[in-house]
């Protein structure tokens, strides 16, 4: 049977802009699609240039559902979060194959910039 998705993903270019202009807030999101009947349990490690990784960040995606997760909402059990204005990278593992897309909305200038890409599996 063909697998729908992968269990190990990377997003090397993360950055939550410090500023927003207008009504739309700058943000980033990972969009996770679970095509399987059972929930997918994700574990994430966030890497930085100048500090130790933020690890043991977890999310659950219900079966046959999608979930859009803003990266500024991610935290571990000690409530450590991704700081704004700091480059980072994500490593995501899942106990079930999933599909992961990454998006950034930068509204730090009047002309909004929207970028999206499939993660590297």
Image (cartoon, rainbow, N blue to C red):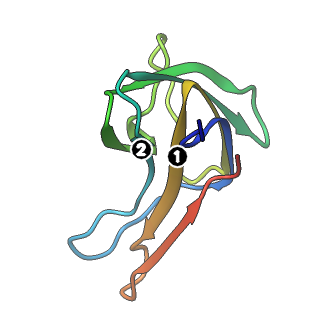
Name the secondary structure under disc 1. strand
Contact, mark 2 vs mark 1 (Cβ under 8 Å) = yes
Residue 77, percent from left and from top: 47, 11
Residue 8 picture quarter: top right
> Which residue is tagged 1?
99
Residue 17 seen in the figure: no
Position of residue 71 in the picture relative to residue 97 (left or right): left
- Indicate whether 103 appears above or below 115: above
> Which residue is tagged 2?
33
Q: Image point 79% across, 39% down: which residue?
A: 50
Quadrant into which the N terminus falls: top right
Residue 46: assigned label: none
Residue 27, percent from left and from top: 40, 57
Q: Image point 26% across, 69% down: which residue?
A: 24
Q: Image point 48% across, 63% down: which residue?
A: 104
- Indicate whether 73 appears above or below 78: below
Residue 55 picture quarter: top right
Residue 93, percent from left and from top: 63, 28
- Furthest toward the top, the residue is 77
Decide which of 38, 71 is in the foreground and name it. 38
Q: Image point 58% across, 59% down: which residue?
A: 118
- Furthest toward the left, the residue is 23
- Furthest toward the front, the residue is 1
Name the secondary structure under disc 2. strand
- Indicate whether 54 appears above or below 32: above
- Indicate whether 77 appears above or below 99: above
Decide which of 93, 3 is in the foreground and name it. 3
């Amino acid at each position: 049977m063909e697998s729908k998705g992968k269990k190990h993903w990377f997003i090397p270019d993360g950055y939550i802009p410090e500023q927003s202009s207008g009504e739309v807030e700058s943000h980033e999101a990972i969009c996770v699609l679970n095509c399987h009947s059972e929930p997918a349990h994700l574990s994430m490690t966030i890497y930085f240039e100048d500090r130790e990784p933020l690890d043991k960040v977890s999310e659950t995606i219900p079966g046959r559902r999608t979930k859009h997760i803003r990266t500024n909402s991610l935290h571990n059990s000690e409530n450590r979060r991704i700081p704004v204005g700091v480059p980072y990278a994500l490593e995501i593992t899942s106990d079930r194959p999933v599909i992961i897309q990454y998006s950034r909305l930068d509204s730090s200038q009047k002309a909004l910039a929207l970028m999206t890409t499939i993660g590297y599996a």
